[in-house]
Image (spheres, rainbow, N blue to C red):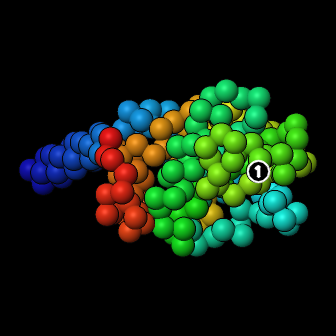
Amino acid sequence: MTLRVIISAMACLAGVMVLYVILARTVHAPPGELARFRLETPAQPPQVTFEDSEGDQHRLEDFRGRYVLLNLWATWCAPCVNELPSLSRLSADMDPRRFVVIAVALPPGDVMSARQFLFEHGAGKLAAYFDRDTVFMRSFHAYALPLTVLIDPHGEEIGRAMGAQRWDAGAAIRYLVDLTGIEESTRMKRGSRASS
């Protein structure tokens, strides 16, 4: 009789665990605006260096303690160009002490041409960064652009999106706020942007 009770309890526990996994995936599923975004098992991202508009070199570990939305883009990539303004608006809407958008341009060009390109294409709120050593695509196994990677405050990659997304849509921002547990900036809370 006790063996039957133990087996029944284990079966119930297994059923609850399966239900939890199904519900967890539904609850954490991204909205349609982020249809290509997928959560991943936390892993250390490649430690590559990139240059800012002052000529200083940076590594992802320089941004530990904050969520980082790392975007790889190029001037020759039409979907990248279309996505950049939404990343710029997202960057302006999030608290920069807790969440930063790092858009790294890939060759050809240089960091100053990337900076000018951002301004000319409605993404002037993004800081200009450049992959001078052309290692990002290979290091991040990016077979297409744009590639966007979400990195947690511990420096681990927790999600990625291959292809352009609407990062500044209301549902996308709510998803990121819920996922990260951070608040959007007071500018966003006051409703300065129309919700989507």
Residue 94: percent from left, percent from top? 47, 61
Residue type at mark 1: give it: Arg
Quadrant containing the C terminus in the rendered view: top left
Of 1 and 103, the residue lying toward us = 103
In this rendering, the answer to whether 154 lies above or below 102 is below
Instruction: Find disc 1 in the rendering and name its residue.
Output: 115
Which residue is found at the position 36% from the left and 57% from the top? 192
Left or right: where does residue 28 sit relative to residue 10?
A: right
| Residue 148 showing in the rendered view | no
Residue 178: percent from left, percent from top? 35, 57
The residue lying furthest to the left in this view is 1
| Quarter location, residue 135 | top right
| Quarter location, residue 50 | bottom right
Which residue is found at the position 67% from the left and 27% from the top? 78
| Quarter location, residue 32 | top left
Which residue is found at the position 76% from the left and 50% from the top? 115
Label 1 Cα crowd, 10 Å radius (few <14 / some 14-19 / many 20+):
many
Q: Secondary structure at mark 1?
A: helix
Residue 152: percent from left, percent from top? 55, 61
Which residue is found at the position 54% from the left and 72% from the top? 97
The residue lying furthest to the right in this view is 133
Left or right: where does residue 168 sit relative to residue 191?
A: right
Of 47 and 113, the residue lying toward us = 113
